[in-house]
Image (tube, helix red, strand yellow):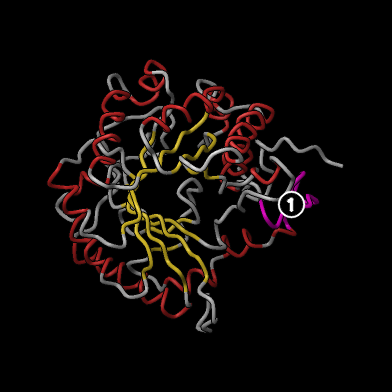
Amino acid sequence: MSEQVDVIKKPFYVQWHITSRCNLHCEHCYQRNTSLISELDEANLQKIADKLDDMAAANNLKLAVSITGGEPFFRKDVIFKLLSYLQNKEHIDALQILSNGLLLGKEEVATLKKIKKLKGLQVSLESPDKAIHDQIRGKGNFEKVVEKIAFLKEHGIKISVMMTISKLNYKQIAEMNELLKKLKVDIFGVDRFIPETKSDFDKSALRPEEIKEAFQTLHDLSQTQQSPRISLNRPLYCLTGEKGTCGARCSAATSSFAILPDGRMLPCRRLPIPIGNVLKDDIVKIWNTSPVLTALRDVSKLTGKCQNCEYVKQCKGCRASAYAVYGDFMKEDPFCWKENK
């Protein structure tokens, strides 16, 4: 980012965690090993919103902000006020909420529908099989989430569903797709379990060939249907279908960052390396001068199979996965199934 304004707005994404508190304790969640992080009051949240708006204006960004947690609706004291405040920011283009949806009723939905920049709500559903979903997200959760999705759709809220695949559920993508059709979900996305540590990788993560099978299944579905719309905006999807025609690069350090409840800034929520504090520091200065971000942008310094891959500029591998498994975010993506030539 710089002070130079381009003609075309550049897409940019901020994932803003306003709390680490949650009403669920999911097996794969990156919050599970995190002690409670202090939360900011309304005034300080508004200061961050002002700084994000200024950043978007100065750099001509098409800025999308996702409000999440923990469970963001644990903060009913501030979330609706914050959404309204963001709604009125000229240079913030779109809002989204990442939530399990369980704390929403008619009154909350009526308030959300007044936020015209709100593009929808993302919820997680891990399996079309009640037992497997509940094993991951807690007993009784499957029925609650399915009922909540139906309720939110009935009240006109656009819903996307994210499925995090592990050894438990990676063969259930097609079956999940059929369930989401019945629920009239708008968008269906699949992401791999990203380990926090090497032990997490060994215990729960899929092997590269299993990731390939799952991602290829989702890609094939994307070629045959319009609803739900299939999202392929993740690294490694470029290896599905006709190579290089879909997928998205790892956005850490290029078009996104994350904010923790206390204002700390990370390259990505799954890459737990603090690079500053958006409340106390100048965001643009952090973006332009952080050694971590500078390193992440230099794909020529990637090692392993990522180094000479023809898709490196459109994929870059998942830097968080490399960091978790190897302790080095510049090493190859440990989930990649592509063989070196």
> Is residue 146 shown above or below 306?
above
> Is residue 12 shown above or below 176?
below
Residue range of the region highlighted in magenta in the rendering: 301-315
Q: Is residue 111 magenta?
A: no
Q: Position of residue 307 (x, y in %)?
A: 77, 51
Query: What residue do we see at 31% from left, 53% from top?
Result: 261
Secondary structure that dominates the magenta span: loop
Query: What residue do we see at 19% from left, 62% from top?
Result: 42
Left or right: residue 91 versus residue 86 is: right
Q: Position of residue 241 (x, y in %)?
A: 70, 40
Query: What residue do we see at 16% from left, 47% from top?
Result: 108
> Is residue 62 shown above or below 307?
below
Please tell me in which quadrant of the rendered image residue 125 appears: top left
Mark 1 nearby-residue class (10 Å; few <14, some 14–19, many ≥20) = some
Query: What residue do we see at 64% from left, 39% from top?
Result: 326
Q: Residue furthest right?
A: 341
Q: Position of residue 144 (x, y in %)?
A: 26, 27
Q: Residue furthest bottom?
A: 4
Q: Quadrant of the C terminus?
A: top right
Q: Is residue 309 magenta?
A: yes
Left or right: residue 154 versus residue 234 is: left
Q: Residue furthest top?
A: 131
Between residues 272 and 99, which one lies in front from this camera angle? 99
Left or right: residue 62 versus residue 302 is: left
Query: Identity of the amino acid at label 1?
Result: Tyr
Please tell me in which quadrant of the rendered image residue 171 appears: top right
Q: Position of residue 244 (x, y in %)?
A: 72, 50
- Tell me the SS state at disc 1: loop
Instruction: Give the residue number, with chain letter if any, for mark 1.
Output: 311
> Is residue 333 shown above or below 211?
below
Between residues 233 and 297, which one lies in front from this camera angle? 233
